[in-house]
Image: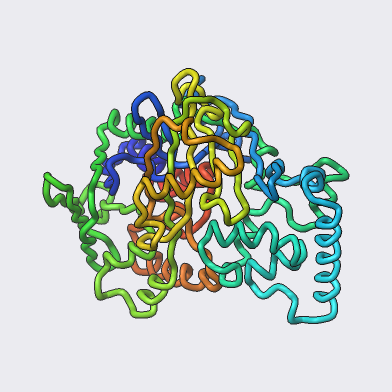
Amino acid sequence: MAAAWTLVQRGHEVTVIEKELHCGGMASTFSRGNFRFDLGPHIVHSPHTYLIECLRRKLGNEFRKHDSVNEVYFNGCRVTYPFSGFGLLKVLSLVTAARCVMSYFSRRIQITFKNIFKDDGSYHTWLVNRFGAYFFDIFFGPYTEKVWGVSTMDLSDIIAKRRIPVRSLHALVRTAITRRSDYHPENSGSLACYYHSQGSGKITEYFHDEILRHDGKIITNAQLRHLTVNGRNIVGVEFFVPEQGIGTIQETNGEHGEDELIFLSTIPINHLIRYFGESVPEEVRESAARIDYTAMIFLYLELDTTDPLGVDILYFSEKEFPFNRISDVGKFSRDMVPAGRTALCLEITCTEGDAVWHLGDQEIYDMCLGPLERHGFLTRKNVLDYHTRRLTHAYPRFRIGYERHVELLTHYINHSIDNLRTFGRQGLFSYINTDEALLMGFEAADRYSY
């Protein structure tokens, strides 16, 4: 949507083909009764101040600073997240803390004298080498396998390098002493954070309205059927819209050259390959089959109370809790919930088609409410209503060796089709934040503008 908005302002004829009934993907907001809901929390924070200033100008005063308070529920206690050494030490017993330290130094000695303990590209080894096996086993291991749905031995260490704000147990202790931490994309506390009072989807809604105002077209609920390729260019797009039938977009010769059709895609990259048919080399198709995405079920609880968690986001590390985190809609904006009420969003990772994915709403509700009641967060009497939303492609699943497959896919696309650009979280198989997704859209538009 950011790319389409940029291009339509520069005079290009733009058509957005959207698979869902609404635009925005994970960064969308929907209404139900007197509530508004995001697909998980999406605050905006970025080291690129010009991006923040652009959003503030376009969205006005409703795009506000938001100081998010996040915690991890760990070992029956709450720990501020991102971790600080002091906060973590408060919830660890002396025995547990001593075991963590001993395990850490034991691992450092092993690394020094035995090559078999050095980093091997796995998430498991990278974390154990920097935090020790004991702390990994009680926190990082269970949480990671719950979030990603596979063994930590199978996951690439790129996840740890990019997503964990604290780099080692030593760094954790250092933050306890100095009370200072370095900038990291996952440590939103180091940057000013912003959120729209009507939900993160208001950014997409702004783009949507401006695209239409500049005579662009947006076709929703559209299923891409076929891409017609002539030589090194896409010259036709065929899609299907229920109750409307088949639609097409064809290349037309114009004053700027023969190759007028430009195709910008955020389709999952392994699915995009399928639209090129049998011309795709076997090794490329094999790589497409070797990468996958986690799915996500969002369980929304509409409550008769406010502030049941005491924080904006609460993460749950232990496997007793089937969800990864809970966000309080009312803590992000009271404008999204009725007076005297709030709503919670619980995120449950799974795989499309697995047993969890096929659970009904009632089963998901019962599965999640049990541990919440046992730990005293809320009771069923507090719940006025509940409902779910599901995403088939939530996060790229970074298995060891995924880079080779993604590189092969992107190389094929970049060197076979001149007027195609794939980008975004799904389109590049990349775990990016909202600001990065917006910047990718602007950069994609810049590449093809004239």
> What residue is rendered at 55% in x and 58% in y?
146
Q: Is residue 304 left or right of residue 277?
A: right
> What residue is rendered at 64% in x and 60% in y?
160
* x then y, percent, for residue 337: 45, 24
Identify the colour scheme used. rainbow
* x then y, percent, for residue 387: 37, 39
Identify which residue, 137 or 396, lies in the foreground.
Answer: 137
Position of the C terminus, as image quadrant, is top left
Q: Is residue 434 left or right of residue 219?
A: right
Identify which residue, 239 or 390, lies in the foreground.
Answer: 390
* x then y, percent, for residue 378: 54, 35
Identify which residue, 83 or 323, lies in the foreground.
Answer: 323
* x then y, percent, for residue 3: 39, 43
Q: Is residue 70 visible?
A: yes
Position of the N terminus, as image quadrant, is top left
Q: Is residue 130 visible?
A: no
> What residue is rendered at 52% in x and 60% in y?
148
Identify which residue, 194 or 293, lies in the foreground.
Answer: 293
Q: Quadrant of residue 161?
A: bottom right
> What residue is rendered at 37% in x and 46% in y?
362
Q: Is residue 254 left or right of residue 165?
A: left
Relative to 205, residue 128 above or below: below
Q: Quadrant of residue 48?
A: top right
